[in-house]
Amino acid sequence: MEVLFTFVPRENQQERLLAEFPEVNFRFLYKNKSFLPTADIVVTYGEDLTAEDIESAENLKWIMVASAGIEKMPHDAIEDKGIIVSNVKGIHKTPMAESVLAHLLALKRALPFIYRNQRNGEWNRKTKSSELAGSTAVLLGPGAIGSEIGRLLQAFGVRTIGCNRSGKKAPHMDDMVSFEKVLDVLPEADIVISVLPSTAETYHLLKKEHFRAMKEDTIFMNFGRGDLVEDQVMLEALKTGEIGHAVLDVFEEEPLPADHPYWKMDNVIISPHVSSHSGKYVERALDVFIPNLHAWIKGDTSPSNPVDMKRGY
Amino acid sequence: MEVLFTFVPRENQQERLLAEFPEVNFRFLYKNKSFLPTADIVVTYGEDLTAEDIESAENLKWIMVASAGIEKMPHDAIEDKGIIVSNVKGIHKTPMAESVLAHLLALKRALPFIYRNQRNGEWNRKTKSSELAGSTAVLLGPGAIGSEIGRLLQAFGVRTIGCNRSGKKAPHMDDMVSFEKVLDVLPEADIVISVLPSTAETYHLLKKEHFRAMKEDTIFMNFGRGDLVEDQVMLEALKTGEIGHAVLDVFEEEPLPADHPYWKMDNVIISPHVSSHSGKYVERALDVFIPNLHAWIKGDTSPSNPVDMKRGY
């Protein structure tokens, strides 16, 4: 059996795989797809496969995506060939929830002000610190990551309102609304956080009216995908003071173009799509992959975290 | 009855006091002590009273300190006259715990790196992000504030080890040690946080040997009082790489002198004694003071949060 990694795990991680599966022929090759035609399984970050690649991969039966987003994959080609796709959704929740809380607490506790004064050698105690406690947060997409963010927010005394398609209950949400009713709760939100994936339904889901419904000091955080909001809508909301701050980990165009107005805006934090980064990332992806591969070898072709290429998540 | 505030609450807060206590003669005067000789009660931040002031205050029976630190007060003069002192210890816990978590998460999730790249207009995804989850923290002084920090750390999956004089149990601490045994646990600590007050016992309590026992990437946070560690000891630990980072909210000399080496050090965060700042601060101090004043007027002279001027906290 041939397993092709299109990224290169650390040496000790490679050794872990080789020791677990002496019968498997592993190839760890950074963005080198020359072994694709013979690979039975591909492990990828999900950004490097084209329809032609899928066409050429004659033995390919399973693509394990060591990431959450699959929007850059050739959905039709994969579906046509009946290739199974799975991802590692759950493993992002800890670093992403910590990033969300880091940015929120940094703004509330005036860390940008504190850092700036230190750079200037200035002892300045005139912080405009506030507190996260007592805030209300609306979470768009309270799945594995959103619920983990909700759990931590609740620990800080934040009221959480989850928002999904159905409005059905989700963990660590004090209240729930459906997308259709989100305008009703946005006026209460001190914080609005999206961790929604990119799908046909979430494309440009947030419009002018949503930002107009928010408070003038609302912190909006997009940690899902950049096509949730059109750039012009986001820019207008920020420039006219309809909201207070945006903390953006994702953008319509990535890398964010060098001349984009966001770079110079005081009320925008640009996090260059790094909120899920963690020194523990590949280790955790292998924790998901290894039991799935053991099962696969025994004939169980239903790995955990299967992805429906039609729905897009 | 005369109550002298040596700071000036916001207008709505003054109105709240006047409405609650029509019989009381309030004076709200910023650092003006001309009414001290006739005041029955003084409400102060604790930094503006001298032994001579206490001598002149012939009617003074109760000093309410709207702060936690009382080390700048004239202890002997107050004790000699049998004046009751109380403070508002508990009200710092929310902003301080949020500040501690903000700084920790900012370092773990690479916020200084993210902010710097944005200033430089650089899309740079090479963060060295790590996670707070799975860390071990040693908390020096797990009282009201320390335990609140412990509660939040535990929510992030951090193991908490409290350290006090007796080693007796404290809330939200997975383990406890006495000060005498702290060297045994420091080698396990990824994070060491002090919220200790300034007393004879805590003066220069942490010495070279304590920093040598820590890991080379330990984050040390002093959010108590600056005289816990001698400057030279702290500087040596940081310069020789005995520890990774220091986040300091308090200093041996405040304001921190303009030529102090900390200002230029990459592994030091200077928070200019602002970690307890909050827009909700005076409001909460009044929430403590008002019921105590009602009781006092009825003859109950034992306000909540009494301070023992001998012990120093």
Image (cartoon, coloured by chain):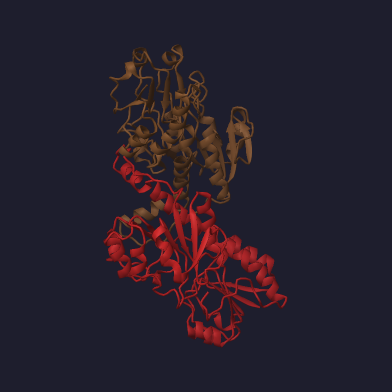
Chain colours: A brown, B red
Q: How many marks?
A: 0
Q: Position of residue A245 (x, y in %)?
A: 45, 42
| Quarter occupied by residue B147 | bottom right
Q: Position of residue A34 (x, y in %)?
A: 28, 19
Direction from residue B227 to residue A167 in the image, left or right: right
The correct choice, above or below, for B23 with respect to B220 in the image is below
Q: Residue at x 30, y 37 (%)?
A: A11
Q: Residue at x 44, y 57 (%)?
A: A127
Task: Return the residue nearer the eye: A170 or A15.
Answer: A15
Image quarter of the N terminus of chain B: bottom right
Q: Position of residue B194 (x, y in %)?
A: 45, 64
Direction from residue A11 to residue A102 in the image, left or right: right
Residue farthest to the front, as pictured: A23
The correct choice, above or below, for B109 with respect to B59 in the image is above
Q: Residue at x 43, y 25 (%)?
A: A70
Q: Position of residue A99 (x, y in %)?
A: 44, 43
The correct choice, above or below, for B160 with respect to B76 in the image is above
Does residue B16 appear anywhere in the picture?
A: yes
Does residue A214 appear anywhere in the picture?
A: no
Task: Return the residue nearer the eye: B134 or A266.
Answer: B134
Task: Return the residue nearer the eye: A42 or B286.
Answer: A42
Q: Residue at x 46, y 48 (%)?
A: B133
The correct choice, above or below, for A13 with respect to A312 in the image is below
Task: Return the residue nearer the eye: A230 or B304.
Answer: B304
| Quarter occupied by residue B79 | bottom right
